[in-house]
Amino acid sequence: MAEALLEIKDLKTYFHTENGVVPSVDGVSFSLKKGETIAIVGESGSGKSVTSLSIMGLIGSPGKIEGGEVLFEGQDLTTMSKRNMRKLRGNDIAMIFQEPLTSLNPLFTVGNQISESIRLHQKASKEEAKIKSIEMLKKVGIPRAEKVYSSYPHLLSGGMRQRVMIAMALSCNPKLLIADEPTTALDVTIQAQILQLMKNLTNENDTSIMLITHDLGVVAEMVDTVIVMYAGQVVEYTDVFTLFKEPKHPYTKGLLDSTPKIHELKDELQSIEGTVPAPGTITQGCKFQTRCTRATAKCFVEEPELKELSSNHKVRCWLHEQEEVAI
Amino acid sequence: MVQIVEEKNNKPTEQEEYLLEVKGLKKYFDISEGWFKKEKHYLRAVDNIDFFVKQGETLGIVGESGCGKSTTGNLIMQLLDKTEGEIIFEGVDLGTLKGEELRKKRAEIQMIFQDPYSSLNPRMRVFDIIAEPLITHHVVKGKDLQNQVYELLDVVGLDRSYARRYPHEFSGGQRQRIGIARALALKPKLIICDEPVSALDVSIQSQILNLMAKLQKEFQLTYIFIAHGLPAVKHISDRVAVMYLGKIVEITTKEKLFDHPLHPYTEGLLSAVPIADPELRDKKHRILIEGDMPSPANPPSGCRFHTRCPYAQDTCKSEEPKLMEAKPDHFVACHFPLKEGHGVLIEK
């Protein structure tokens, strides 16, 4: 088995607000191998984006990493100096954001923005950087790359902008690509193009991907391993096939059942009653207690641990305390 | 209370069957430039579309951003003035109505919006939001008004005590319920839902979709469901229209559309949807539609899809195909409709 490229151990990111401490990420642990694609799935407020920002060291006040380790190739990123972190970001770890228009600077040309990271991280001259940038633009399937190189972001369509973001992210051959809802803002035909592109590029370079999404369809098509998050915690952690076939956490099951499936027809969708609780409101017991159909008295008192059912299946639920049960 | 008085006829005549009929509808936006706007340019957001909606059914309208689906909804809702065409609601062309008559008819068509955050006035209490249409249309007053609002809250599954609160105190799903209660207040016959669930989380989406289905049965509602998320459209619709650059390219029942599409665009669109089953990922063959959608300000000649169509031929570049009934009850605008169109899953 290949060694872990990224290992998160008991990561805790808390936000210190006027109304008290909000634990957005509350003891998250997982690891990512080289070339592996992992998905973090969860609804808004589950802490999936905060997890990725914590890895990148992009948590600003009032948020703070309160505990845990983020080991990237054995180095702890949480204790790394800002200077070293800057060297790493954009070079070894790159990130793609959801909204490509707001993550590109409208005042600079596309070429300027791509070549910036190449010049910073690869000590390339202006001309070399330009050649490399155009090459990257061609690689991500942008027609008339020379022309796009000197255009401003507002001239491009959403799909094109996301391609530019990907070109930028991959320009330094990162070892890890964090993609935070990379296709949510895009139309479905463009989404298919972008996902295909990400697959091809990562196969070529053996890049690991951490995909943050709420679209289970994208998860089913793209990833190897899935982490399901709820209220700042990992509730289920397994490979994609097991997750869809035999989910063990009632929340995962609820998510799968409430997704309308394009290849099936159902009269009525199952749904999870209620809404995600505001972080910090449930202080005792399982975080999912308020919405769980199978909650018992114990669930309201004691918080379950993330229990290992088999070597690649972990779940945080009291149902499987004695033995694995089907849900 | 919220009882729709009109009983659904068991055997409606051909004419009555259509609650809404749209004929040759066009909406051009003026984007002229130059000194005194001498250079005339128009953005053809909706360009000559025809369709009908039967009483009690759900018509889904799908397409990518910029295809004109929301403009169509706004035109039916009379929020935009049409350039040309007829919108016939219950046998009356809405364009010929004026003043009080139009006001009355409009009460029968309501809308649910995409973004539950911006479609509710942040300075109004939930009670006032839901009561507003009842007051403006002089339906009820005083104690009865209060009762009606409370009953509407019950219908959409919200607690009566929420009436005193402001929209910011609610989650997205709850706000969408408030929006639905407001749309139901005037006992409409037709509700236009413009992306009602796309801003919501998955588990909340299904709650809202189920609520909409329940209300449809309870009050014999007719829906026009505009969305880009195909799985949700497939779930809720009876018939589906696919739009591309201001045109309807295909319209038929949900089963026919999703299993045997006739238009290459529909086929590509279906194939692009990720399937939520990892077992199928390697068995699936994908038809990728290349490129981006052209600008509706400058649409391609002939068939508007020919620039991205994998099967395009010379005729497609010059002649525009008309929407024709290629198979019974299956309309398609294509010179060379697919003989064996692939549905969602194309086995390798």
Image: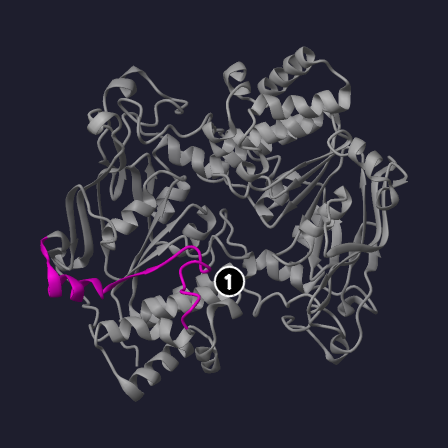
Query: Which residue is more in the foreground, B255 or A143?
Result: A143
Q: Is residue B308 above or below residue B206?
A: above
- In the image, residue B212 lies at what x, y percent? 40, 64
Quadrant of the snapshot with the N terminus of chain B: bottom left
Query: Which residue is more in the foreground, B276 or B303?
Result: B303
Q: Residue drawn at (81%, 37%), measured in percent from left and top?
A: A85
Q: Describe residue B264's horizontal placement relative to residue B205 as left or right.
A: left
Q: Residue drawn at (29%, 68%), measured in percent from left and top?
A: B220
Q: Describe residue A90's horizontal placement relative to residue A323 as left or right.
A: left
**SS at mark 1 in the image:** helix
The quarter of the picture where residue A202 lies is top right
How did the renderer colour the structure?
Answer: one colour
Q: How many marks?
A: 1
Tell me if residue B11 can be seen: no
- In the image, residue B188 lies at what x, y percent? 26, 67
- Residue A228 belongs to magenta span: no
Q: Residues within 10 Å of mark 1 (few under 14, many from 20)?
A: many
| Residue at the far front in the pictured view | B35
Q: In the image, which residues are magenta? A: B96-124
The quarter of the picture where residue B319 lies is top left
Query: Which residue is more in the foreground, B208 or B334?
Result: B208
Q: Describe residue A59's horizontal placement relative to residue B341 as left or right.
A: right
| Residue at the far right in the pictured view | A74
Residue linked to disc 1: B172
Q: Residue drawn at (47%, 52%), measured in percent from left and top?
A: B198
Q: Residue drawn at (49%, 54%), measured in percent from left and top?
A: B199
Q: Is residue B111 above or below residue B152?
A: above
- Residue B111 belongs to magenta span: yes
- In the image, residue A285 lies at what x, y percent? 76, 73
- In the image, residue B272 lies at what x, y percent? 49, 36
